[in-house]
Amino acid sequence: MDGLTPVAQRAPGRWQIATVTSIERETPRAKSFRLALPMWMPHLPGQHYDVRLTAPDGYRAQRSYSVASSPLDEGEIELTIDRLADGEVSPYFHDVVVVGDRVEVRGPFASYFVWRGEEPVLLVGGGSGVVPLMAMLRHRRRTMPELPMRLVYSVHSAADVIYAGELEADAAITFSREAPPGWTGHAGRIDGPLLVATGFEPATAFVCGSNGFVEAATGLLLENGVEPDRIRTERFGPTG
Amino acid sequence: MAAEASIRCEVMSEFVSRGFTGRRRTPDELADRLPPGQYAEPGFPVLTAGPTPEIDPGEWSFRIDGMVAERAEWTWADLHELAFEEVPCDIHCVTKWSKLGTSFRGVSLDTLFETAEPLDAFAMAYSHGGYTTNLAIEDLTDGKAWVVTEHEGEPLPREHGGPARLLVPHLYFWKSAKWVAGLRVTDHDEPGFWEANGYHNRGDPWREERYWTD
């Protein structure tokens, strides 16, 4: 972590009222929400926004969600939200929010788990941990398609694949519990050979998922010679 | 104009999320212990920016140096010769969860500062693995900070900073550096790891000091 250049601090911190412009169902548990922001500013791929819900009696709940879209989408952001059964904010988004609704947000925040153009880049995502990585992949495809970046994405089964229509040759998927019939790719948990199949030494590896997933994936990266200071992790806190 | 501006402000603050009533409300007797924007979480989530370091207590030590009357270093055995305190507390993570009614056990920074008396107002805590976080000395003294080795009666798990972490429960939990290796007392304040990456310089949860500009 030494040697990181602190970035200039901007002033993104104000709450603003965004409008939901589209909702896309990704999986039975995940939906992507496009929000139009009156005070939009470009984010770094990997940054997050805070969302705040307010009840009529003033009760409030806040959560953080990673941005899934490229900062080239001017004026809007996409948040992909996993529905947690015992959650408070994610069930609201899934069960209540419709296009045209307004939600309070502020951001973008945090400048560590962000991609600033370094290469080559290895992205390792488990489940909805793919969301901030997709912002990086989408942005790279639109700005520097030749830049070596590869996503290794672990999901339980075919029904859990978020952004299924966008996983191209730069993405390798593995089904940790149940591969679809006729699947000839990797099955089972992420392993060393799958991670090193990129054929490059990552300048930075971004790993995002549950704590267990991140521990396992970083352990494999370390075993395969990736230096600890080249591995950036983001672990799900409990959210919802 | 002034009236119009104030009306607009009021409208902003009265924003209501259509159809939101709130599900995970905290019982009244605990609600007063939740800082703004936080919710009570029964578990103890892990949030670490890189791989989890593995530090054997035999290799662990804690040092206080820099602007101090006398620099000092404690090994695991040295630390355990000092007075341990039980620290019941609530902890608040900037990612919005709080853990109410938990406890740690360790040595007060007041005790360690008796040996290495700070001569200036600031400190940078640093950890095995390279993590840093900045704290004012006044946030570390008078019974507000500890080096802890136990959580709820068990040795502190590695993923939560074991064998030893800093505990500064009145600030957001990123200030409670895991795998803590020492404190450098300085004559000026400078941002640590998360503080240089967009989070607040001090991090008081009751003032909701989450991000740099809050």
Image: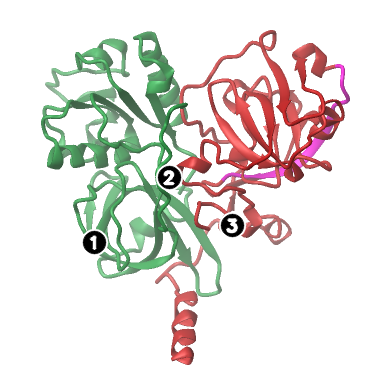
Chain colours: A green, B red
Circle 1 residues within 10 Å: few <14, some 14–19, many ≥20: some
Identify whether A195 is placed above or below B92.
above
Mark 2 and 1 residues: CB-CB less than 8 Å, in contact?
Answer: no
Marks 2 and 1, Cα distance to the nearest angstrom? 20 Å
In the image, is A109 to the left or to the right of A192? right
Name the chief secondary structure element in magenta. Answer: strand
Question: Which residue is disc 3 drawn over?
Answer: B208
Chain letter for mark 2: A
Could you tell me the amino acid type at mark 1?
Gly
Q: For residue B35, what is the image quadrant?
A: bottom right
Q: Which residues are magenta?
A: B81-93
Badge 2 element: loop
Residue drawn at the location 72% of the way across and 21% of the way down: B63
Q: Quadrant of residue A115?
A: top left
- Judged left or right of residue A17, residue A1 is right
Q: Are marks 2 and 1 on the same chain?
A: yes
Determine if residue A165 is in view: no
Q: Quick one: B87 or A229, which is closer to the camera?
A: A229
Residue under circle 2?
A: A110
Residue type beneath disc 2: Ala
Q: Residue B153 versus residue A195: which sits nearer the camera?
A: A195
Q: Position of residue A162 (x, y in %)?
A: 24, 40
**Helix, strand or loop at disc 3?**
loop
Q: What residue is disc 1 on?
A: A75
